[in-house]
Image (cartoon, rainbow, N blue to C red):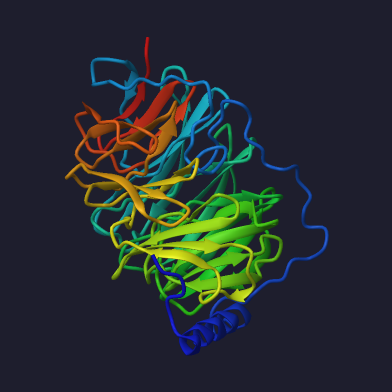
Amino acid sequence: MQGGIMSGEVAAAVWAVCLCACRTCGDALQEIDPKSGWDTLSLPVAADGDWPWWRGPTRDNVAPDNQSPPTAWSERSNLVWRVSLRGLGHSSPVRVGERLYVTAGEKTKNHAVLWLYGLERATGKTVWQTELYAGPVGRLHPDNAPAAATPACDGERLFVPYQVGAEVELAAVSVNGDRLWHKTVAPYNTIQGYSASPALYKSVVIVPVEGPKGCYLTAFHRATGDVVWRRAIRANNESYAPVLVMKLAGREQVLLIGGLSTRGYDPDNGNLLWTCEGPARTCVATPVTDRTTVYATGGYPGRKLLAIRADGHGDVTKTHVVWSGDAKAGYVPTPLLHQGLLYAVADQGLLRCYDTQDGHVVWQHDFKTPFYSSPVLANGHLYLFDRQGSGFVVPAGRSFGGVVTNTLPSGVFASPVIVDSRIYVRTLGDFYCLGTP
């Protein structure tokens, strides 16, 4: 595995483009600087037993300790409940208290509808259904859906970004299903359609939009929807990855990959902290971190897996790449990091376990089936679902321990949620709660 991956001349040019994109918007949206006193709300904190946003309470798809979810299931065994929701969705559910929240939508050639559901956790019964959007449909990949981004919940409000024709909007909805506000985030029109989940930080919800009409990072006040800050983050190029907000290398950072680079931003103002070339032009997966190093995988047209130290400033391509390599780490599924091992399943089904120290492959297993869903870790096991309906359970660790294979009637695009020894997974057909009776 090798470190620096491009010449000094190219690195300098990339940094110059990033600086230019951060300071000017041309005829597009204008940047907004934060005003003093914007942080007026309590911190969004995940309560015990909650899974309130994309990738769970610790933002790493690792389920809380002391759980025993089933390792075997079907549509008739270890089934707590199964419900059918109107519409299709690839977003993951979130759980807060006694409620589950999940989006679903429908689309025709010219029209799209998006709903947010509030469900009883114990039974899956619909408590409320709120329409977020009905109108022209934007361009979508055949495998994408209007309900692609996973909501984020601060305990009082749910935040859902979605595509409306040629724009991305953000809606805030109360936990009782009342619409509180909705705002236009940025113009948007891409080949694949929008899918990036929002992230919460202090009093704001942060939303990335990256497309040929502009690339922006915007922070909205959670209570009012007012823009606290907005940055044009780079030259226009479409990408689809969510942001990750995390304290690493001694400072709070917003991490984002795509558009030929991996970047760290200051969540208090959106200013660019560092940038590193790679892993690819177009990315879908979320970056993952061990609080010192960022691991980024993508994408299209080429694929690469990067390990980047997160303590840098400016262009760090030649100085902070710990290791790089392997075009088989995946495009859509987000890797999972645990105890020095990085587990990554590729879209085509190759699961690899990497040592985070140097990037060497510890073991691998080829499922020979396609994936979009990301793995979740619970009780020492990886849980993975493929696009055909199979669910796999693989022991985590440095030795490959075999595979338990289960089957549901429909394929899975959404990543599962594991809380209180229950597996909440939505398929292309129904929404399931799996658990031991």
Q: Residue furthest left?
A: 368
Q: Nearer the viewer, residue 336 or 411?
A: 336
Q: Image quadrant of residue 91?
A: top left
Q: Is residue 326 above or below residue 11?
A: above
- The residue depicted at 42 percent of the width and 73 percent of the height is 260
Q: Residue furthest right?
A: 37
* Residue 234 in picture, x, y percent from top left: 52, 76
Q: Nearer the viewer, residue 404 or 283?
A: 404
- The residue depicted at 29 percent of the width and 37 percent of the height is 385
Q: Report the quarter where the C terminus lies.
A: top left
* Residue 39 in picture, x, y percent from top left: 77, 53
Q: Is residue 19 above or below residue 287?
A: below
Tell me: 53 left or right of 44: left
* Residue 328 in picture, x, y percent from top left: 28, 58
* Residue 125 in picture, x, y percent from top left: 42, 21
User: Would you say residue 17 is visible in this rendering?
Assistant: yes
Q: Residue furthest top?
A: 437
Q: Is residue 256 above or below residue 431?
A: below
Q: Nearer the viewer, residue 17 or 149?
A: 17
Tell me: 104 left or right of 31: left
Q: Report the quarter where the N terminus lies.
A: bottom left
User: Would you say residue 183 is visible in this rendering?
Assistant: no
- The residue depicted at 63 percent of the width and 40 percent of the height is 154
Tell me: 245 left or right of 143: right
